Amino acid sequence: MSDERSFAEQAARTRAAWHRYQAVRASTEAGVIRLSAAAQRFMVVLQEGTDQEIAEHPDLAEINVMLDGYYEDPKAQ
C-alpha cells in the first residue's frame, strides 16, 4: 500500500510540475508577443522619423538616391 501511495504522490508531483512548466511557457510566449508588437511599432516610428529627416534635408535625399544607384544590383537591369 505504501508503494502505491508513494507512486501516486510522485505522479501528482510530476503533473503539478508539468502544469507549472506550461504556465511559465505560456507567460513567456505572451511576453514575446507583446515585445514583438512593441518592436514593430518602434520600427514604424523610427522609419517615419528617418523619412521625415531625409525629406527635410534635400542633400540627404540626393545622397540616398546616389547610393541606391551605386548599390543597385547590375543583374536587375
Image (tube, rainbow, N blue to C red):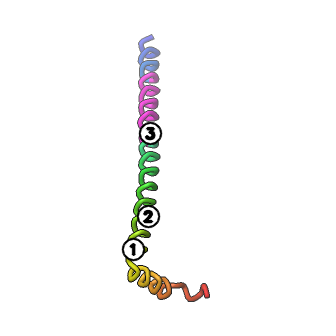
Q: Amino acid at mark 1?
A: Glu
Q: Which residues are magenta?
A: 11-28
Q: What residue is rendered at 40% in x and 65% in y?
A: 49
Sequence-wise, the earlier of marks 1 and 3 is 3
For residue 42, what is the image quadrant? bottom left
Q: Where residue 58 sits: x, y (%)?
A: 41, 80
Q: Residues within 10 Å of mark 3 (few under 14, many from 20)?
A: few
Establish if 27 lies above or below 62: above
Q: CA distance from mark 1 to mark 3?
A: 46 Å
Residue of label 3: 25
What's the distance in space between the residues labelled 2 and 3, CA to CA? 35 Å
SS under mark 3: helix
Q: Earlier in the sequence, mark 2 or mark 3?
A: 3
The answer to whether residue 67 is magenta is no
Between marks 1 and 2, how big is the CA–CA gap?
12 Å
Is the C-beta separation of discs 1 and 3 under 8 Å?
no
Q: Residue at x 41, y 18 (%)?
A: 6
Magenta residue check for 21: yes
Q: Position of residue 68 (x, y in %)?
A: 48, 83
Q: Which amino acid type is marked by label 2?
A: Glu
Work out whether 50 lies above or below 30.
below
Circle 2 packing at 10 Å, graded few (<14), some (14-19), many (20+), is few
Give the position of the N terminus as an image quadrant: top left
Image quarter in which the C terminus is found = bottom right
- Disc number for residue 48: 2
Instruction: Answer with left or right where residue 43 lies relative to residue 75.
Output: left
Task: Return the residue nearer the eye: 24 or 36.
Answer: 36
Q: What mark, if any, has residue 56 been given in the picture?
A: 1
- The reply to whether dot 2 and dot 3 touch (C-beta < 8 Å) is no
Of circles 1 and 3, which is in front? Answer: 1
Q: Secondary structure at mark 2?
A: helix
Q: What's under tag 3, amino acid-wise?
A: Arg
